[in-house]
Image: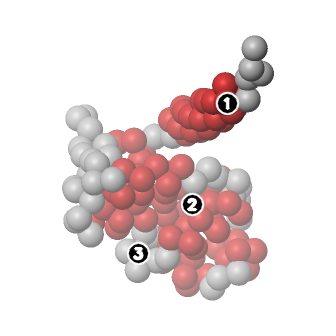
């Protein structure tokens, strides 16, 4: 099955697709842990009806509720954050990635950010050392 790309970031269906896939992940993990909707909703601090809407991927659901639910289940939020970054930068995110495990991609992103910060810090330190060399 070929990977379908998400519509461009200007298309409102992008966010709807992210919420739909997030809702599926949340529901699947909740069921895996054998937690009822009522118990989980109480744990997260939302109503059971609203949890059903989140799990159904209702486009009107709030992203912060998706984050709270994912966090409460110990799920990574990469399935929300990474596509949002693509959307913000007007890039096309392959829809197939939303259905898979993003943990390796998350690790690559975190490592790239850490390397960038380390490179920036090293450059700043070396530049400062060069400015303070003793005169001969």
Residue 70: percent from left, percent from top: 62, 60
Query: Of 99 and 114, which appears nearest the observer?
Result: 114
Count of marks overlaid on the render? 3
Q: Nearer the viewer, mark 1 or mark 2?
A: 1
Between the C-alphas of marks 3 and 2, the distance is 13 Å
Q: Is residue 116 above or below residue 51?
A: above
Check the image and report above or below for 134 versus 47. Answer: above
Give x and y (percent) for residue 126. 67, 26
Q: Could you classify mark 1 by the number of other residues whose Cα lies within 10 Å: few (under 14), some (14-19), or many (20 or more)? A: few
Q: How far apart are marks 1 and 2 (CA)?
A: 53 Å
**Residue 71 visible within the image:** yes
What label sits on residue 131 in the rendered view?
1
What colour scheme has been applied to the protein in the rendered image? secondary structure
Residue at horizontal 36 percent and vertical 50 percent from the top? 86
Residue that numbered label 2 is attached to: 26
* Displayed quadrant of residue 94: top left
Q: In this view, does 108 lie to the left or right of 127?
A: left
Q: Earlier in the sequence, mark 1 or mark 2?
A: 2
The residue located at (56%, 72%) in the rendering is: 64
Q: Does any portion of residue 126 appear in the rendered image? A: no
Residue ID for mark 3: 58
Mark nearer the N terminus (3 vs 1): 3
Q: Position of residue 105 (x, y in %)?
A: 50, 35
């Amino acid at each position: 099955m070929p990977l379908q790309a998400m519509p461009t970031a200007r298309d409102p269906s992008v966010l709807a697709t992210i919420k739909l896939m997030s809702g599926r992940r949340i529901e699947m993990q909740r069921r895996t842990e054998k937690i009822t909707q009522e118990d989980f909703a109480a744990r997260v601090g939302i109503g059971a009806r609203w949890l059903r809407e989140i799990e159904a991927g209702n486009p009107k659901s709030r992203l912060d509720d998706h984050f709270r639910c994912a966090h409460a289940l110990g799920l990574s939020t990469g399935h929300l954050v990474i596509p949002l970054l693509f959307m913000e930068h007007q890039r096309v995110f392959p829809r197939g990635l939303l259905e898979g495990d993003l943990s390796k991609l998350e690790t690559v992103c975190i490592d790239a950010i850490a390397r960038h910060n380390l490179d920036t810090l090293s450059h700043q330190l070396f530049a400062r050392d060069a400015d303070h060399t003793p005169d001969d």
